[in-house]
Image (cartoon, coloured by chain):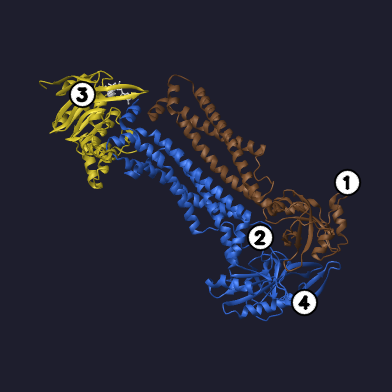
Amino acid sequence: MSVVLGRDLTKVYSLNGRQVAALRGVSLTIAAGEYLAITGPSGSGKSTLLQLLGGLDSPSSGRLELMGRAVEGLSDDELTDLRLRQVGFVFQRFHLMPVLTARENVELPLAEAGVGRRERGQRAAELLAYVGLADRSDHRATQLSGGEMQRVAIARALANRPALILADEPTGELDAATGAQILALFDQLHRDGVTLVVVTHDEHLAARVPRRVHLQDGRIDRDELATAR
Amino acid sequence: MTWALVVRSLVRHPVRTLLVIAGIAVAAALLLDMVMLAGGMERSFSRMLLSRGYQIRLSPKGTLPFDSEAMIPAITPILEDLRDDPDIEQVGPVLATSLHVSVGDSLLTVVGYGVDPAAQGLYELESGTDLAPGDSTGLVVSEPAAAAAGWRLGDTVRLQGRLDPQSARAAVERVVVVRGVVRFLYDARGQRSVGADFRLVQSLGRQPDVDPASMVMVKVRADDRVDAVAERIAAAHRTVEVNSVAALVVQFRSRLVYFQQLSLILATISLVVGVLLVGTILTITVSERIGEFAVLRGIGVRRARIVRLVMAEGAVLTGVGAIGGVVLGLVTARYLDAILTSFPGLPAAISFFVPERTAIARAAIAVFVAGVAASGYPAWLAARAPIAETLRADAE
Amino acid sequence: MSPFGVLALLSWLLPTAPTFQQLPGIAIERRLADRHGLSVGDTVLLTPKPDRPAARYLVEAVYQPKADPATALRGEYQIRFHLPELARLLDAPDRVDRIAVRGRPGVPPDSTAFRLNQPAFGYRAYPSELIAAESSRTFAVVSRFHRAIGVISIVASAVFLLCIMLLKVEERRLDAAVMRLIGISRATVFRAFVLEATFVAAVGSVLGVGLAAVAGALTNWVYRRRFETSLVFSHLSVEIVAFGVGLSLLLGVAVGALAARRLVTARPLALWRRAG
Ligand SMILES: Nc1ncnc2c1ncn2[C@@H]1O[C@H](COP(=O)(O)OP(=O)(O)OP(=O)(O)O)[C@@H](O)[C@H]1O
Ligand SMILES: [Mg+2]
């Protein structure tokens, strides 16, 4: 079963009465376990596409199925639940809850999914260990470095064992070395069978990803599989 | 988790949070005071009138009790008639008149009350002994009177009545003995009063030949018969004004419209201030944190939960504020009461601010509900924010 | 209590049949005239007590009593008699409640009163000032009460103002960061924010005065109608306006300065970070 099935997706924003077409007909299928990079010049619609794939926004037209369910017919609560359990987001600017600790940030989606307190704590500890932050779990989000924050964000994205992880320029705010650590983590996720979609400007990153989708002016102009890795 | 988020978000801006709580506390205090003021006087008036269980007052036609020097003439047949009524338990006539005593070489004027010791609803004994029925040489005195005249229990007192203004000489004099110190329920603060047997005071007062009384207090056996008995007495004795305490309270209320309206207006204003305060502050903090709410929505937190988060912040603010407000309100009420009870001639037993559990609960709940309701708008703002757009704006 | 209070009025209006015998004249207050449709030339029956026989009077004048807060809130009406007529009606000839005395210019009222009190036959003399002070005690209490309530309201509104001004300045965190980063001096940023706070406080005060004027006018309108009097219930004096405006300006500027100081003393990058 494909995790994402998009047909002729468009997204039109109206800005001060003017129509801005961010996506002009994108069709994309992503199978379970794939690792995919979306590249393209600034303004080509990468973030917009990612938001549609994650159910953060809905397409202006076209058909989108996530985990086999048509997004169109979902109520807001159903879509929210889909994001909670099936999708994990990693943002360029981390977007952790500043008042919560690292562990609490990871526990948040678990609590929302109704996981019991004890199991929650256990799973958060495992995830923080997985991203290499076991010793930072009681630090407030604001007390962490950028790389650490991003790793907490990844742990949070993984909390409910989603079928799909979406990352929008996850290394954009990090230096090269820290970025490399994050990429290593993504590789590990890929090996562990997680479906990954990463938006990036980073040629380095794109080069190591098996499938590369290139956007230009709201359209896919290249969709290539790396022959070897 | 919800509470961690709520409490830490509030602690994030301690000055702001404390100011809001202080603001709500002051508004709640004012509201509580006004709720107490609105019902307090009436209740304390009714409590004062009913304090010895007499539910009906007979007074001279056209007046309220103690309203003037008017008197009911020919009281004895009326009293006899009332005592014959099977519904009536006790009948207590009262005559108030000016009496005088010599203290040193000056003349002290006191209010003299004539009562029937067997049925008096006028005072409560503080020390010494009460007048016994038929005791025609006993005197009970108020604390201020005792202090002014230097009386002690057992002292002999020459009571003088019907002072001639031309000669400053009394027409009658009776010798009595101080039996007890009492608190007259309807006296103003510091009023010098004495009580003695009804017939004795009649003989000392003006126009003894008309058999006068200032008032008759009637205790009805069953509370649900009060109105019927009052009606019956009024029909039988057209020369007197008959009022049940409930009816007097209604008249009293009409004289206090001012305070009622003032308290209504100020209560409304304080609620509005509370609502504005919570509403504005939460709206601002929510718009500061709108990105955080968008992230929460993005990672799968439902709208309803966001609403609950914001409203919980409002609830904590108003809850803590309301508790502070109750304390503050009780303190300020005592101060305000001290001001208002210094009205000249007001019975000392009247309070304007009566701290009752229902009033406190009502004010606290009103503030709380209003505050939580006021957080509805910011909660809606937070829950409604479009996720993708807000995140994008927040990243800029 | 004045005898007017006890006076029960039975306003049985006779049909305006001209009466030829000379009736004693009275003057009635406008409220009474309006309420019962009386006008000059009407006849009324008056009795001091319901069970006493009534006497007939001719309304000779309708007058507007001087607004007096002590009587305005009571429902009683006033009627003016010629003194002998009232004495006859009350069956109390040769009796008065009060005598007003005007001393010769230059003689202090205190000493006159003292001299009048020397023989003390059935009266006591008081200087008018003393009586005025005594009879305004009730209103003194009310006004102390109002002042106390006023203090509470001022505290409440001061807290409110503090909150708003604090937020108003904190809102500008990012602007402060930008201004500092592009090299504008602390003092200039500080001055800009204090100026802004002052402006907001000033505009707020002016609006507040307007609101107070409207609320006061409304209060007067309602209570004047209710009590049928020309008394002023709410009076927006210059001092009150000055106090209100002064206080809110002071608070506004003080809080603005306080919050602005916090902004300019923080490192610009810290501001940036917290604003982001
Ligand atoms: N909410 C919006 N309102 C109006 N226009 C928008 C909105 N969001 C995106 N756009 C426009 O849609 C187009 C695509 O934006 P998008 O953010 O998807 O580009 P991107 O490929 O992610 O660019 P970048 O690499 O700079 O992040 C841009 O022209 C952008 O200005
Ligand atoms: Mg982008």
Q: Residue at x 59, y 45 (%)?
A: C151
User: Which residue is the extreme one toward the left?
Assistant: A228
Tell me which chain the residue with mark 2 is part of: B
Residue A27 position within the rendered picture, expressed as x and y whole percent measured from the top left: 18, 25
Q: Earlier in the sequence, mark 4 or mark 2?
A: 4
**Element under disc 2:** loop
For residue A35, what is the image quadrant?
top left
Q: Label 3 marks which chain's residue?
A: A
Q: Are marks 2 and 3 on the same chain?
A: no
Residue carrying label 1: C106
Q: Nearer the viewer, residue C79 or C256?
A: C79
**Which residue is denoted by mark 3 in the rendering?**
A26
Tell me how far mark 3 sits from mark 1, CA to CA.
105 Å
Q: Indicate the colour of chain B.
A: blue
Instruction: Give a yes or no on whether discs 3 and 1 share a subunit.
Output: no
**Where residue C269 sits: x, y (%)?**
40, 25
Q: Give whichever of B310, B60 is nearer the camera.
A: B60
Quadrant position of residue A165:
top left
Assess whether mark 2 and mark 4 are in contact (beta carbons under 8 angstroms): no
- Residue A60 shown left or right of residue C77 in the figure: left
